[in-house]
Image (cartoon, rainbow, N blue to C red):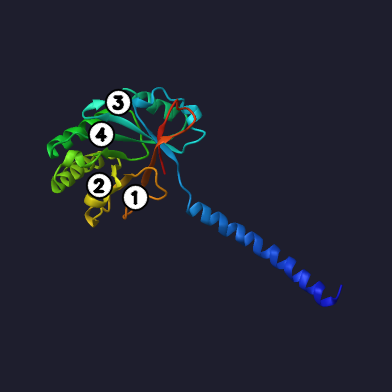
């Protein structure tokens, strides 16, 4: 082999040995920076869940605590299942409020039902499609009243609604502090324009431990 070819080969091997570990480190950092958590949101509609099996596929769960001042019949069972399998969880409450006073009563109901539970994810206020057409200012006041009451009690508070509702009512800077959970299913990318913490991307996911479809989130 000619001397220049030998030199070129040695240079190439040396460069690979130096660059490869650096590339691996950069890739690992990028993967960590862009990593997503995958979780489910559940209620009594999901029947009895095998949380041990589910824990092999999910990173978190959001448990329905109640709806319109009624406790979800599976809530305490699901809390116990998450605790027993070291699954991080939060809760959501489906509102039926017609004004601020109702929202404060609902917050009190949720706080009472949370006794003994230790969620590490937020307590989400589910308003569906704008609480059946409530005027925007009143809707915003209801959301703020509920969330403030939850936060005053020492929990994280958040809002769940659909992408178009979130864009319409809660994309302003006055709601930048809200932990937002956006629902928009069967699409490749969530269309909400602002910052959000969680995206409900499917209502028909399949996860071990569930006998049927389950809502899935990133």
Q: Are marks 4 and 2 in contact (CB under 8 Å)?
A: no
Q: What residue is disc 3 on?
A: 72
Q: What residue is disc 2 on?
A: 165
Q: Residues within 10 Å of mark 3 (few under 14, many from 20)?
A: some
Judge left or right: residue 24 versus residue 82.
right
Between discs 2 and 3, the one toward the N terminus: 3
Q: What residue is disc 1 on?
A: 196
Measured Cα–Cα span from mark 2 to mark 3: 25 Å
Query: Of discs 4 and 2, which sits in the foreground?
Result: 2
Q: What percent of the width, then of the height, locates residue 161?
A: 28, 43
Q: Are marks 2 and 3 in contact (CB under 8 Å)?
A: no
Measured Cα–Cα span from mark 1 to mark 2: 13 Å
Judge left or right: residue 115 versus residue 23.
left
Between discs 4 and 3, the one toward the N terminus: 3
Q: Secondary structure at mark 1?
A: loop
Q: Secondary structure at mark 3?
A: loop
Q: Residues within 10 Å of mark 2 (few under 14, many from 20)?
A: some
Pick the residue in front: 187 or 5. Answer: 187
Q: What residue is disc 4 on?
A: 94
Quadrant of the rendered structure where residue 124 is? top left
Quadrant of the rendered structure where residue 210 is? top left
Q: Residues within 10 Å of mark 4 (few under 14, many from 20)?
A: many
Residue placed at 37% from the left, 39% from the top? 120
Most extreme residue toward the front is: 186
Q: Residues within 10 Å of mark 1 (few under 14, many from 20)?
A: some
């Amino acid at each position: 082999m000619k001397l220049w070819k030998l030199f070129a080969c040695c240079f190439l091997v040396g460069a690979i040995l130096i660059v490869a570990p650096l590339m691996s480190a950069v890739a690992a950092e990028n993967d960590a920076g862009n990593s997503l958590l995958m979780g489910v949101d559940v209620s009594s509609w999901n029947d009895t869940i095998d949380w041990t099996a589910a824990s092999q596929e999910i990173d978190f769960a959001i448990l329905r605590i109640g709806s319109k001042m009624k406790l979800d019949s599976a809530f305490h069972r699901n809390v116990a299942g998450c605790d027993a399998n070291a699954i991080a969880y939060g809760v959501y409450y489906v509102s039926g409020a017609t004004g601020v006073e109702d929202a404060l009563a609902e917050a009190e109901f949720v706080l009472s039902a949370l006794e003994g539970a230790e969620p590490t994810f937020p307590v989400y206020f589910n308003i569906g499609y704008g609480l059946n057409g409530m005027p925007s200012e009143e809707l915003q006041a209801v959301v703020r009243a509920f969330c403030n009451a939850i936060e005053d009690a020492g929990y994280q508070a958040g809002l769940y609604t659909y992408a178009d509702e979130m864009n319409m009512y809660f994309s302003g800077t006055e709601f930048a502090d809200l932990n937002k959970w956006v629902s928009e299913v069967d699409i490749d990318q969530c269309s909400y324009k602002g910052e959000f913490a969680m995206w409900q991307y499917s209502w028909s996911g399949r996860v071990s431990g569930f006998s049927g479809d389950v809502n899935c989130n990133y």
